[in-house]
Amino acid sequence: MAPSKKKHASSQARIIPGGFAVLSLQFNSDSAARHSLYVKEHKVRAEKSFHRPQDRTLFVLNIPPYCSEDVVKELFSQFGNVESVELRDHPGSTQESGPKLSKFFRPPGKQGFNVGYIVFKKSSSLTEVKSHPHDVPLVVCTEQRPVRTGVQKWIQQYTESFIHPDKLQQTVDSFMENYDKCKEEEAERQKEEAEQQKEEEEGWVKVTRGNKGTKARPHSEAANQRTLQKEMRKKKRKELMNFYTWQHRNTQKEHIAELRKKFEEDKQRIALLRAQRKFRPY
């Protein structure tokens, strides 16, 4: 009875301080070395993101470099359907908020141990992961799912680094089409705004056909008052601009007249000095 009890106890899940459950990871069935993964339910009060729902997201630490997102998804699919897998360099980091770059121009990621966020379709999958026995390892490399490491992995990365010209041209053409479309929409929008502003400055309002079924609203007294006040402000602003223009022209005329007066005075002074230049030996 004692051996069976000891065997039953060894097949239980292992929980360490911090609420992490320890899972054993084995590269292949012939490998004697094992690696430990630390998992717990993802619960962060400050983070409110629909990408990581707190009731269905598993937080994983100490993921080896040879485990990609696809490999991690296959490993944890035995506990339930996996919606998404997200691997990051450190906890708390999220996906880039900038524009999405093409895979051809994306820099290579950092090689090292990662943290992961695994989102399941059902919350019951988290309980199954945490209750998984510690002495039953998760096998990474199998015949159905081979994982390359070492020189084979480097050769594969080197081979995949070559870009096929047709695929690259297709990606560039697609990007340029979207770029030209956005530029045309922006130019059209600016043109419409300029025409609308010009019509408002000239006192015209552009009338367009509305949607079917919509009824025209009668002009109320308040709406008429607002329109009248708007026209009065435009009129005052125009009068003020005309006044400033007249004042500027008048100032220029006075300045030109002053310059001409000084010019005539300088001419008379020069003529007087020339007349006074006489030869007087004694």
Image (cartoon, grey):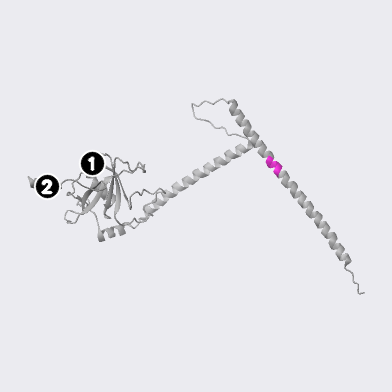
- Determine which quarter of the picture holds residue 128: top left
Residue closer to the observer: 242 or 56 = 56
In the rendered picture of this protein, how many numbered marks are placed on residues?
Answer: 2
The image quadrant where one finds the C terminus is bottom right
Q: Is residue 237 left or right of residue 158?
A: right
Chain-order first, disc 2 or disc 1: 2
SS class of the residue under badge 1?
helix
Regarding residue 80, the answer to whether it shows in the image is: no
Relative to 116, is 170 on the left or the right? right
For the residue labelled by badge 2, is the local secondary structure a helix, a strand or a loop? helix
Q: Which residue is mark 2?
A: 7
Q: Name the one closer to the observer, 131 or 263.
A: 131
In-front residue for pair 210/164:
210
Q: Which residues are magenta?
A: 240-244
**Is residue 30 a member of the stretch shown in magenta?**
no
User: Residue 108 at x, y = what percent?
Assistant: 35, 56
Q: Residue furthest bottom?
A: 281
Q: 105 left or right of 123?
A: right
Q: 246 or 64: nearer the eye?
A: 64
Q: Position of residue 113 (x, y in %)?
A: 29, 55
Lateral position of residue 180 relative to residue 64, left or right: right
Q: Give me the residue at 80% from left, 57% from top.
A: 263
As drawn, which residue projects farthest toward the left?
A: 1
**Other-residue count near label 1 (Cα within 10 Å), few / some / many at <14 / 14–19 / ≥20:** few
* Residue 71 placement (x, y as % from top left): 26, 50
Task: Tell me which amino acid carries mark 1.
Answer: Thr
In the picture of the structure, the residue carrying the numbered disc 1 is 127
Mark pair 2, 1: CA separation: 22 Å
